[in-house]
Image (cartoon, helix red, strand yellow):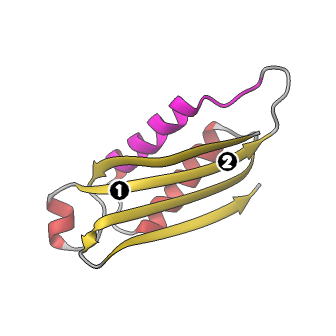
Amino acid sequence: MTIHIEALTFDVIIGLLDFERDKPQRVIINLEASYDYSDNKFIDYADMVFLIQNELKEKRYELLENALLGLKDILYTTYPNLKTLSLKISKPDILQECTVSLSKTWDF
């Protein structure tokens, strides 16, 4: 099975610049995660959304790279039956001309 969480949007403190540390900014999270479904062992996608939001709001990461690694760690620790995980964090408001994103895929 593959879970898709698309365009999860919320405000967090994330970034290195002074104004990014003072005021929350909008981020958009996209996730794709595969796992073996058997014997009614499933992953609750609502819990996944809560974990993602909680991790980013609590940790207030400076770098998107560290935010991605932190999300990977909390998701894989919580759901050790994950086979693959792909995450993308976008900051649509940091530059006027574009949306900036960072992504990573892991195989477990």
Name the spot of residue 71 as percent of width and height, x first.
52, 52
Q: Position of residue 106 (x, y in %)?
A: 69, 61
Quarter of the image with the N terminus is top right
Q: Main secondary structure of the magenta part?
A: helix
State how far apart marks 2 and 1 are (Cα): 19 Å
Q: Which residues are magenta?
A: 41-57
In the depicted structure, whether residue 106 falls above or below residue 8: below
Could you tell which of marks 2 and 1 lies nearer the N-terminus? 1
Residue 2 relative to residue 11: left or right: right
Q: What residue does disc 1 label?
A: 27
User: Horizontally, is 99 left or right of 22 in the view?
Assistant: right
Decide if residue 1 is on the left or right side of residue 49.
right
Which three-letter amino acid code belongs to the residue tagged 2?
Ala
Q: Residue at x 61, y 28 (%)?
A: 44
**Residue 51 is inside the magenta segment:** yes
Q: Residue sitting at 48 percent across and 70 percent down?
A: 102
Where residue 96 sits, quadrant-wise, is: bottom left
Looking at the image, residue 2 sits to the left or right of residue 30; the answer is: right
Read off the residue under disc 2.
33
Q: In the rendered view, would you say 61 is above or below 55?
A: below
Residue at 16%, 57% (x, y): give it: 23
The quadrant the C terminus occupies is: bottom right
